[in-house]
Amino acid sequence: MTQLRTIFLLIFITGCSSVNKTAAIASPQVIIGTVNFLEQIKLPVNAKLTMKLYDVSLMDVPAILMAETVLTLSDKASMQLPINFEISYLAEKIKPQHTYSVQAVITINHKMIYTSTASYPVITRGNGKHVDIVLQQVKNSNSPLQSAKKVEYSCKNNRKLTVSYTSANDEAIAIINGQHRQPIILPAKPTASGFLYSNGKHTLRGKAGDLQWTIGRMMPIKCTVADKRQIAKDVM
């Protein structure tokens, strides 16, 4: 009888241990941090702050969205600077050998007004779970709320590319957009003719309706404006 009780006790302890391990694995982890601005600002009450966690490990593919938090800046507490945020993510989806980065965007009526332009790595490769992000304004110098000019490109292998041309802090930039992907911001660079935007890893180079998109050391991807009425020189 004593032996039977011992067996039942061992089974009970083993079962509780398994449940605890499963709960620990499934429980969400949290990235915390702050969002601030380069200049003194006053946001309207309908502004939304979107925080996204991306897997940015691979150079030749778009970043993978891992987690997202949206905060409506409608009360005094959330409007105080810096803005505090949290992003919950599942620990079992994180791979130690991968690289993860946080991106912040503020929108007003679905228009991107402020965005992070630097890399903010977290979680792996010696990075922690706290990050302080500085946003830059994305605007037309004459109209802060004017949306960027968006151009659709058709590329080889049936790929589609959407680029928004606008300015940030009175400097021309191009933003490569994609659904569920991290926007890629490229500052304008001097060039003898046509246009050139690059952040070192991604490069857009072209003239009129023709465009070459280069990622790292890959061969350039050739693209053409889908609508011939939209040509890049019209949106610079």
Image (tube, rainbow, N blue to C red):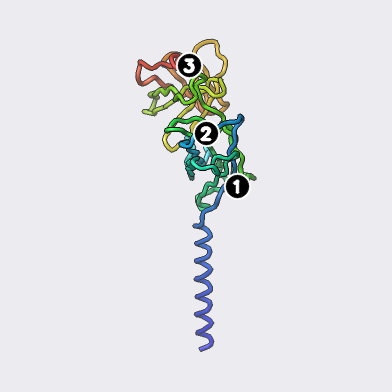
Q: Position of residue 100 (x, y in %)?
A: 55, 42
Amino acid of disc 2:
Leu
Q: Outermost residue toward the bottom?
A: 1
List the residue tagged with mark 3: 236
Could you say whether the residue bearing mark 3 is in a helix, strand or loop?
loop
Q: CA distance from mark 1 to mark 2?
A: 27 Å
Task: Check contact, mark 3 vs mark 1: CB within 8 A.
Answer: no
Could you say whether the residue bearing mark 1 is in a helix, strand or loop?
loop
List the residue tagged with mark 1: 129
Q: CA distance from mark 2 to mark 3?
A: 27 Å
Q: Position of residue 205 (x, y in %)?
A: 50, 19
Could you say whether the residue bearing mark 2 is in a helix, strand or loop?
loop
List the residue tagged with mark 2: 43
Q: Position of residue 224 (x, y in %)?
A: 39, 19
Q: Position of residue 214 (x, y in %)?
A: 50, 25
Estimate how packed mark 1 is, as few (under 14), some (14 to 19) or many (20 or more) residues with alpha carbons within 10 Å: some
Residue at horizontal 38 percent and vertical 24 percent from the top: 154
Task: Check contact, mark 2 vs mark 3: CB within 8 A.
Answer: no
Estimate how packed mark 2 is, as few (under 14), some (14 to 19) or many (20 or more) residues with alpha carbons within 10 Å: few
Residue at horizontal 55 percent and vertical 50 percent from the top: 30
Task: Check contact, mark 1 vs mark 2: CB within 8 A.
Answer: no
Which mark sits nearer the N-terminus, 1 or 2? 2
Q: Outermost residue toward the right?
A: 126
Amino acid of disc 1:
Lys
In this rendering, the label closer to the viewer, 2 or 3: 2
